[in-house]
Amino acid sequence: MNKKVIVMGASAAGMASTIRLQQEGYEVELFEKDALPGGADSSLNKKITEGETQYVR
């Protein structure tokens, strides 16, 4: 049986949930409405957040 999950929002919590679910064997699709991941964190200083979110592009 294939286990499939949709995660809405690429915030820190959404990305962490996606990783954890994949580790548990789920097939995960992550959706984000904005151009960049990070949720509310993406409005913080770009120098700080750019280094953290580059890995999920």
Image (cartoon, helix red, strand yellow):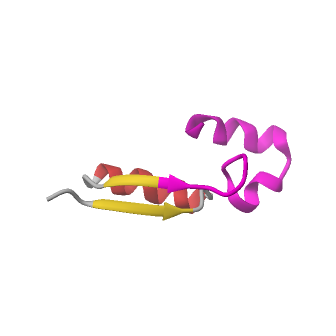
Q: Quadrant of the N terminus?
A: bottom left
The answer to whether 48 appears left or right of 19 in the picture is right
The answer to whether 48 appears left or right of 37 in the picture is right
Q: Quadrant of the C terminus?
A: top right
Name the residue: 20% across, 56% down.
Answer: 2
The answer to whether 30 appears left or right of 12 in the picture is left
Count of marks, rendered view? 0
Name the residue: 45% across, 60% down.
Answer: 17
Q: Quadrant of residue 47?
A: top right
Spot the residue most to the right.
45
Q: Which residues are magenta?
A: 30-57
The answer to whether 52 appears left or right of 23 in the picture is right
Name the residue: 70% across, 36% down.
Answer: 51
Is 54 drawn above or below residue 7 in the view shown?
above
The image position of residue 26, as x and y in percent, is: 29, 55
Name the residue: 38% across, 55% down.
Answer: 20
Nearest the eye: 8 or 52: 8
Q: Quadrant of residue 21?
A: bottom left
Nearest the eye: 32 or 52: 32
Is 55 drawn above or below residue 37 in the view shown?
above
